[in-house]
Amino acid sequence: MANRDANFDFSAKQRRPSLFTRSFTMHAEKPPSVDKPSSLERAGSAKGIYSSIESLMPSGDSIKGKVRRLRSLFESAKSPSRGADETQTVAHALPSKLKPAKSVDCGYDYSCAFRLPGTEDRIVVYFTSLRGVRRTFEDCYAVRMIFRGFRVWVDERDVSMDSAYRKELQSALGEKNVSLPQVFVGGKYVGGADVIKQLCEAGELAKILERFPKRAPGFVCDCCGDARFVPCTNCSGSRKVFDEDEGVLKRCLECNENGLIRCPDCCS
């Protein structure tokens, strides 16, 4: 019985190995390998594509040939290093291209044939104070501000306040359609807004206005408030006067179509 138990135990031990005798070595299963081309293989494939492209091209139109031609063009376009003599010639040639400030063409013709008789001692500006055309009003305003910046005495003639000024300007320029503003200096015609702005920027306008008297800074006429017109003193701006001899109303001959006269203080 003891022998049988011993044999049974021995056979059980043989069938069930001990925990310490088992091998727990685990091997991770590798994923299926993906064939990736190495760098050498990629380079070889690129060379193969490159050679196939070259084989399709004519002999003179290969990529290398084009690159060589482009390099030769760019390298030939580069100028060689300048020597001392060439540098000196370039240095002497540059100043000749620069124009002096006096040669700037500002559009002012000193020998202009257009003249305004009786205004040799003053500056006359024909302009409009109406804002019907925005560009015209802005040009007129800009020219007036330029002359006020020089503080010179200006005879401002508003054609919108007196139609006689428009007829006078048309007669002086010999044209029916004239643009505004128009400037006469010393009886000579200068030009419009563009010419005055260019003369001012070039510094020529200050030289032209040197001989004209200056007025006090911030001067404003007490009579007209720089409007250059006041109501007619004969008809009080009604443009009509009563003729006692005939007993009827007649048109006032001292004022314009708006019943205004030139300011006796600043425009006399």
Image: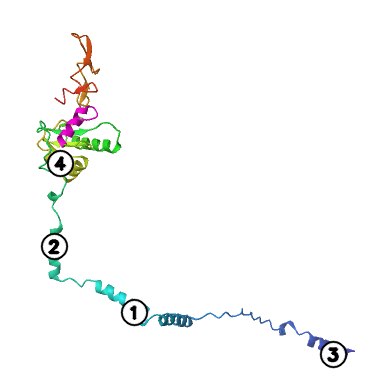
Residue at the spot 85% in from the left edge and 88% down from the top edge: 8
| Residue at numbered disc 2 | 93
Q: Say which quarter of the image contains residue 52.
A: bottom left
Instruction: Give the secondary structure at mark 3.
Output: helix
- Horizontal side of 18 relative to 107 (left or right) equals right
- Mark 3 and mark 4: span between their CA atoms? 135 Å
What x and y, as percent, mark residue 15? 79, 86
Inspect the image, locate mark 3, and give the three-letter code of the amino acid beneath it: Asn
Inspect the image, locate mark 1, and give the three-letter code of the amino acid beneath it: Gly
Q: Say which quarter of the image contains residue 79.
A: bottom left
Instruction: Give the secondary structure at mark 2.
Output: helix
Residue at the spot 34% in from the left edge and 76% down from the top edge: 67
| Residue at numbered disc 3 | 7
| Residue at numbered disc 4 | 205
- Mark 3 and mark 1: span between their CA atoms? 93 Å
Residue 156 at least partly seen: no
- Mark 2 and mark 4: span between their CA atoms? 32 Å
| Residue at numbered disc 1 | 65
Disc nearer the start of the sequence (3/1): 3
State the extent of the magenta-drawn residues as a range.
158-173
